[in-house]
């Protein structure tokens, strides 16, 4: 098997992990109905997954730093498969939560290891492309996995989604065991070194941008299916199409965001994208009574929201190019924490205010991110001037 095909297998694994995480938002109302729980309780399935992913992954990666990468990938992909089987078989909300915890532990390690293996088996000079391909698998889960999950839930049983993920996971394990060669472990990065970057205020501010941008997005996205059904009155057919369009727009937005950051700079791209993000969340509430308007606003929202993703990653890498891997790892953990916080805050909003309030509260979260971006760029020239002045005085 060629290295290109092996990388596509790793992209499939990334797709399965992404689907297992994001699909809950697409079938939230179905889960609540069949388990006889509230929408808020169902939404916390995303909070729990993201928290375990964010906090557990760095610890496990550190503890297994000397393991062969293929062995690590197979072991935790196996855990991920078992968790999906349990999610399909076990009855009740409590046991499903336990399955989601195991799923998150497996998922986090699988994604990090898949990215590492992809860079190791790629041809010389193609490492970045290999990593991008694996990440695209994660993005594809929004385009295909979420709407497909909704379709399965509407036609049969939403738990079949996890059975399907488990089957594809087993196939991926067989291919990886047969085709991916053993690979040496990387030198472990001490936790102290990883956290030392947080002593730099500009890096902390940049990570806060990630937190509030994605947190605001998560507040609304976690409850988007019940919102579209209950507030906008969408039918199943229109909802599945809307989720598909939403996913496609996220991919286009990600591509345009990367191009814009190269062409017009990080600051302009972030502010423009996040401003459109805020406008689309507000419009989503205002146009709730029109299916066509909501459909178009969903596309704008997804496009704007995900244009900030590659821009933020590029921004963080340029802040500490000698520690790019650590920066991306920190950003990944912050993204998962933001998803967890957003789902939690969204649940509070739904229970304390109303389902329709999630778009307004989400917009406030993104607005905070915009304020931080503007403030950080305004303070940068001042710091630079002070530094130059001190040098001149010296």
Image (spheres, helix red, strand yellow):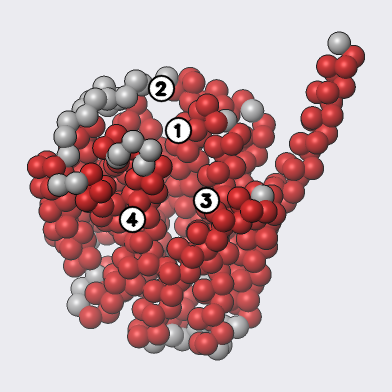
Residue positioned most to the top: 394
Q: Which residue is mark 2?
A: 189
Q: Are marks 3 and 4 in contact (CB under 8 Å)?
A: no
Q: Which residue is mark 4?
A: 137
- Of the numbered discs 1 and 4, the one sitting upstream in the chain is 4
Measured as percent of width and height from the top left, residue 383 is found at 79, 30
Closer to viewer: mark 2 or mark 3:
3
Q: Are marks 2 and 4 in contact (CB under 8 Å)?
A: no
Q: Quadrant of residue 123?
A: top left
Circle 4 crowding by C-alpha within 10 Å: few under 14, some 14–19, many from 20: many
- Which labelled disc corresponds to residue 31? none
Q: Which residue is mark 3?
A: 310
Q: CA distance from mark 1 to mark 4?
A: 20 Å
Instruction: Identify the residue at horizontal 59%, vertical 42% (top origin).
Output: 315
Q: Are marks 3 and 1 in contact (CB under 8 Å)?
A: no
Q: CA distance from mark 3 to mark 1?
A: 15 Å
Q: Is disc 2 placed on a helix, strand or loop?
A: loop
Q: Which residue is mark 1?
A: 325
Circle 3 crowding by C-alpha within 10 Å: few under 14, some 14–19, many from 20: some
Q: Is residue 158 left or right of residue 293?
A: left
Q: Is disc 4 placed on a helix, strand or loop?
A: helix
Instruction: Identify the residue at horizontal 38%, vertical 64% (top origin).
Output: 142
Badge count: 4
| Relative to 62, residue 104 above or below | below
Instruction: Identify the residue at horizontal 22%, vertical 65% (top origin).
Output: 161
- Of the numbered discs 2 and 3, the one sitting upstream in the chain is 2
- Of the numbered discs 2 and 1, the one sitting upstream in the chain is 2
| Relative to 293, residue 136 above or below | above
- Of the numbered discs 3 and 4, the one sitting upstream in the chain is 4
Q: CA distance from mark 2 to mark 1?
A: 10 Å
């Amino acid at each position: 098997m060629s290295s290109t095909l092996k990388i596509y297998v790793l992209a499939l694994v990334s797709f399965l992990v992404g689907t297992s995480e994001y699909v809950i938002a697409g079938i939230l109302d179905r889960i609540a109905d069949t388990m006889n729980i509230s929408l808020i309780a169902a939404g916390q399935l995303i909070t729990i997954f993201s928290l375990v992913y964010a906090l557990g992954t760095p610890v496990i990666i550190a503890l297994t730093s000397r393991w062969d990468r293929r062995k690590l990938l197979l072991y935790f992909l196996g855990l991920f498969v078992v968790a999906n089987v349990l999610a399909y078989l076990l009855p009740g909300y409590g046991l499903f939560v336990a399955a989601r915890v195991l799923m998150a532990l497996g998922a986090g390690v699988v994604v990090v290891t898949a990215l590492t293996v992809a860079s190791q088996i790629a041809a010389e000079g193609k490492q970045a492309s290999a990593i991008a391909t694996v990440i695209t698998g994660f993005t594809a889960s929004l385009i295909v996995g979420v709407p497909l999950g909704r379709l399965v839930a509407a036609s049969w049983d939403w738990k079949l989604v996890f059975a399907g993920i488990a089957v594809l996971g087993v196939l991926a394990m067989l291919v990886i065991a047969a085709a991916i060669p053993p690979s040496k472990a990387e030198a472990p990065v001490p936790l102290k070194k990883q956290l030392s970057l947080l002593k730099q205020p500009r890096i902390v501010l940049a990570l806060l941008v990630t937190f509030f941008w994605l947190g605001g997005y998560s507040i609304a996205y976690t409850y988007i299916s019940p919102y579209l059904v209950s507030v906008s009155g969408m039918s199943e057919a229109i909802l599945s199409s809307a989720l598909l369009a939403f996913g496609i727009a996220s991919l286009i937005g990600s591509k345009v965001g990367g191009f814009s950051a190269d062409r017009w700079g990080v600051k302009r791209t972030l502010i423009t994208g996040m401003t459109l993000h805020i406008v689309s969340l507000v419009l989503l509430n205002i146009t709730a009574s029109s299916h066509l308007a909501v459909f178009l606003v969903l596309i704008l929202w997804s496009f704007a929201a995900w244009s900030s993703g590659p821009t933020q990653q590029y921004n963080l890498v340029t802040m500490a190019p000698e520690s790019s891997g650590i920066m991306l790892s920190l950003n990944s953990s912050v993204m998962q924490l933001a998803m967890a916080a957003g789902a939690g805050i969204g649940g509070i909003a739904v229970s304390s205010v109303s389902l329709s309030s999630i778009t307004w509260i989400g917009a406030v979260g993104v607005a905070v991110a915009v304020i931080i971006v503007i403030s950080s760029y305004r303070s940068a020239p001042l710091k630079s001037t002070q530094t130059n002045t001190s040098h001149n005085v010296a």
